[in-house]
Amino acid sequence: MLADAVVDWGALLEVVWTSLLGGIGVTAIFAIAILGATRAVDLRQDGNAAAAGAYAVLTVVALAAVAVAVVLGILVMTQK
């Protein structure tokens, strides 16, 4: 192909799959954090403190995972 001399297909494929994984993964984990927060509030209002606490822990863990992903992304970008 004409583009083979110009395009590094391996590097392009790596960028595409890591971008998809990072974008979908971080979005899904943040959605889990939102779910945990809303369920925790609802359950706390209903008087179910144990389940509310479990969902609150889920929220904190998910937000920590998102923060780690953001920091890792920044580190990767600054070291290249």
Image (cartoon, rainbow, N blue to C red):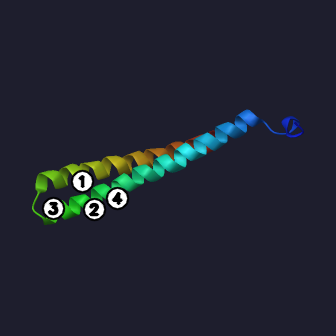
Location of residue 24 in the rendering, given as x and y in whole percent from the top left corner? 50, 49
Q: Is residue 13 visible?
A: yes
| Rendered image: mark on residue 56 | 1
Q: Give the image quarter of residue 6.
A: top right
Q: Nearer the viewer, residue 80 or 9?
A: 9
Label 4 vs 3, first from the N-terminus: 4
Residue topped by disc 2 = 38
Residue topped by disc 3 = 44
Q: In the rendered image of this protein, does residue 36 appear above or below residue 17?
A: below
Secondary-structure class at tag 3: helix
Measure the alpha-carbon separation of dots 4 and 2.
6 Å
> Foreground mark, 1 or 2?
2
Q: Amino acid at mark 4?
A: Ile
Residue at 47% x, 46% y: name it: 25
Label 3 vs 2, first from the N-terminus: 2
Measure the alpha-carbon separation of dots 4 and 3.
15 Å
| Rendered image: mark on residue 34 | 4
Q: Relative to residue 25, is residue 39 drawn left or right?
A: left
The reply to whether discs 1 and 2 touch (Cβ–Cβ < 8 Å) is: no
Q: Quadrant of the N terminus?
A: top right
Measure the alpha-carbon separation of dots 3 and 1.
10 Å
Q: Quadrant of the C terminus?
A: top right
Residue at 15% x, 66% y: name it: 45
Measure the alpha-carbon separation of dots 3 and 2.
10 Å
Label 4 vs 1, first from the N-terminus: 4
Label 1 packing within 10 angstroms: few (<14), some (14-19), many (20+): many
Location of residue 30 in the rendering, given as x and y in whole percent from the top left corner? 41, 54
The reply to whether discs 4 and 2 touch (Cβ–Cβ < 8 Å) is: yes
Secondary-structure class at tag 4: helix
Location of residue 77 in the rendering, given as x and y in whole percent from the top left corner? 62, 44
